[in-house]
Amino acid sequence: MLEVRDLRKSFGDDPVFGGLGFEVAAGEAVAIVGRNGAGKSTLLKCLVGAEHHDAGEVLVHGESRDETSASFRALTAALLDDADYFPDVSVVEHLRLQAWLHGTPDPEREVLAALDELGLSEVRDQLPPTLSSGQRHRLGLASCFVRPRGLLVLDEPEQRLDVQGRTWLRERLKAEKAAGVAVVFASHDQDLVDAVADRCVTL
Ligand SMILES: Nc1ncnc2c1ncn2[C@@H]1O[C@H](COP(=O)(O)OP(=O)(O)OP(=O)(O)O)[C@@H](O)[C@H]1O
């Protein structure tokens, strides 16, 4: 599904990573781990095209990743560390938009299921700025789960989740793998990594 070959990235003269290579097959999860500032978020951004790498290749189904291609974006659900929301679009409307944009069959059913699963039903009509930080993070996760996906890219998905939320996340990511989704996630949560990841890439 995803293959990373000899990927290199610097900011100015400061190398973030170099010579990085790994693969993620459908139904597998790879965890990106490392200290603060090691380059995890930068790597995930390079995978989805939110940041340009200096050298190397990111291949999806054997083809060079092209973030301008509708088919790549249709395949790839991502929650990065700088997720942003329209300030005047409610929670439920954000989810409807995602589901509609990516051609979810029976979008309203998926949206209601995601609201319920992420504990967002009570705040469905609120605007993102009025949400707690944990609820906003849950909206970002829900946005990934209301749409079809073959590749799931998550940056510290555990952040701001309460204890029950972390348990839910662990089971959800296992279910994603079981459904054949390739998962790449950066994390500082060793329990999550141990429970979900087939392999780790340490930066
Ligand atoms: N746009 C940028 N311009 C310059 N330097 C940057 C930029 N983005 C990130 N960096 C630097 O690149 C390095 C890697 O940052 P990155 O956010 O990828 O780390 P991380 O492993 O995700 O860290 P954390 O665990 O704290 O989230 C850091 O030293 C950071 O300061």
Image: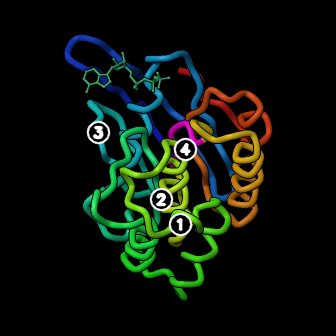
Q: Amino acid at mark 2?
A: Ala
Give yes or no for residue 99 being in the magenta stretch. Answer: no
Residue drawn at (58%, 62%) of the image? 120
Mark 3 vs mark 4, CA separation in Å: 26 Å
Answer with left or right where residue 75 lies relative to residue 73.
Answer: right
Residue at mark 4: 134
Specify which label sits upstream in the sequence, 2 or 4: 2
Q: Is mark 2 within 8 Å of ligand 1?
A: no
> Tag 4, which secondary structure?
helix
Mark 2 vs mark 1, CA separation in Å: 6 Å
Magenta part of the protein: which range?
153-157
Residue at mark 1: 149
Mark 2 vs mark 4, CA separation in Å: 19 Å
Specify which label sits upstream in the sequence, 2 or 3: 3
Q: How is the image coloured?
A: rainbow
Q: Nearer the viewer, mark 4 or mark 1?
A: 4
Mark 4 vs mark 1, CA separation in Å: 23 Å
Specify which label sits upstream in the sequence, 3 or 1: 3
Q: Nearer the viewer, residue 60 or 122?
A: 122
Q: Amino acid at mark 3?
A: Glu
Q: Nearer the viewer, mark 2 or mark 4?
A: 4
Residue drawn at (69%, 49%) of the image? 169
Specify which label sits upstream in the sequence, 4 or 1: 4
Mark 3 vs mark 1, CA separation in Å: 21 Å
Dots 2, 3 in contact, CB < 8 A: no
Residue at mark 2: 77
Question: Where does the N terminus fall, quadrant-wise?
Answer: bottom right
65 versus 70 height, above or below: above
